[in-house]
Amino acid sequence: MTRKQLQEKVGIIGKSKAISDLLDIVLQVANSDVTVLIQGESGVGKEVFAKAIHFASSRNTEKLVNVNCGAIPEGILESELFGHIKGSYTGAINDRKGYFEIADNGTLFLDEIAEMPLTTQVKLLRVLETKEFMRIGSEKVTQVNVRIIAAANKDLKSEVDSKRFRSDLYFRLKAVTLQIPPLRERKEDIIPLAEFFLEQNNRKNLGREIFLSKSGEEALLNYHYPGNIRELRNIIESAVALNTTGILTDSDFIPHFQKDLHRDSNPNLPIYMNRTSEDLDREMVYRALIEIKRDLEELKFLAKAQMGTNNFHQIEPKSKTNTEIVPIDEMEKQAILNALEKTKWNKRKAAKLLKINERTFYRKLSDYDL
């Protein structure tokens, strides 16, 4: 199988040297049974590379079983991996195969392996070394022939140093390591990926074809993508859903970009010079909280604007005892219309006049069907 055939088979989009080098390694190790560890930030495409290893291997006619270790509660992860017999614990009403048995002769992909409890790590190491295990509650040894691929968005070496991950399991997993760089470090892959996602959306929306403009490309190239490929796909899908012209420009994308904390003037935000994936997750939480606060402030501002405090069409109270109640959403919609009329429907100027960011303004236009 050639590199191009493999890319087409599993959907790896990219022409950067980093992607080419990774694909070469995949093709070299695919037909061995060596354990592969895939590391990289959330959203870089670790699962796609696991598929590439499986489909390039001699096991490609057997199952590829994906297990997200971080999504399974600690109390049942062992049962999910190794299975159980009827009556082995409360709720075990039947015998059940685990993922190791289901993936026998195929490939087992253990995603977010850094989240695996230490007690389960011990049992996983034993399976890797002996190719055998026992279901929970059973005394019968089961043998399996499974190729293991593991993935982590945390630095496993740091997890080992912090005693959160077993060193013996780490060295057993990292026989071959694929380090997938974040999207911001391989800019030449951004436009091919964007065009691929845009083509996917065009196929879904039969009869409505949307194109990417030069200014749209420049906006995409200048963004930093904390959420990597997953975020790029979401940006394209959101921009397509709101587009009415058939051409995606910079103004279609900018409202969907997250603000770069390094450029944020808000003194209450922490600045991380050497950010890890954990730092990025924390930053996203900060951004969400601050965005909620901004939305509340913007709502209060729009209400005041409609009442005549910001040079819009003022509403004079009929009397001091007037008790008429106007719904906030109606006031907000009218304030937006006033701003659009004042700026001759220049949306960017209207958003600036209302003192709200463009992303929020475009969302409100959609909410009010304007």
Image (cartoon, rainbow, N blue to C red):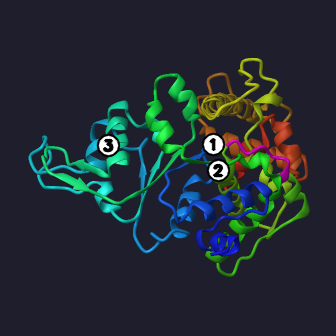
Secondary structure of residue under mark 2 = loop
Q: On the rendered structure, is 190 left or right of 132? A: right
For marks 2 and 3 on the same chain, the one whose residue lies earlier in the sequence: 2
Residue beneath disc 3: 77
241 is within the stretch colored magenta: no
Where's residue 253, x and y in %? 78, 53
Mark 1 surroundings within 10 Å by alpha-carbon count, few (fewer than 14), some (14 through 19), many (20 or more): many
Mark 2 surroundings within 10 Å by alpha-carbon count, few (fewer than 14), some (14 through 19), many (20 or more): many
Q: CA distance from mark 3 to mark 1?
A: 23 Å
Please identify the quadrant where the C terminus is shown.
Answer: bottom right
Residue beneath disc 1: 41
For marks 3 and 1 on the same chain, the one whose residue lies earlier in the sequence: 1
Where's residue 247, x and y in %? 82, 67
Q: Nearer the viewer, residue 332 or 201?
A: 201
Residue range (magenta): 220-226
Please identify the quadrant where the N terminus is shown.
Answer: bottom right
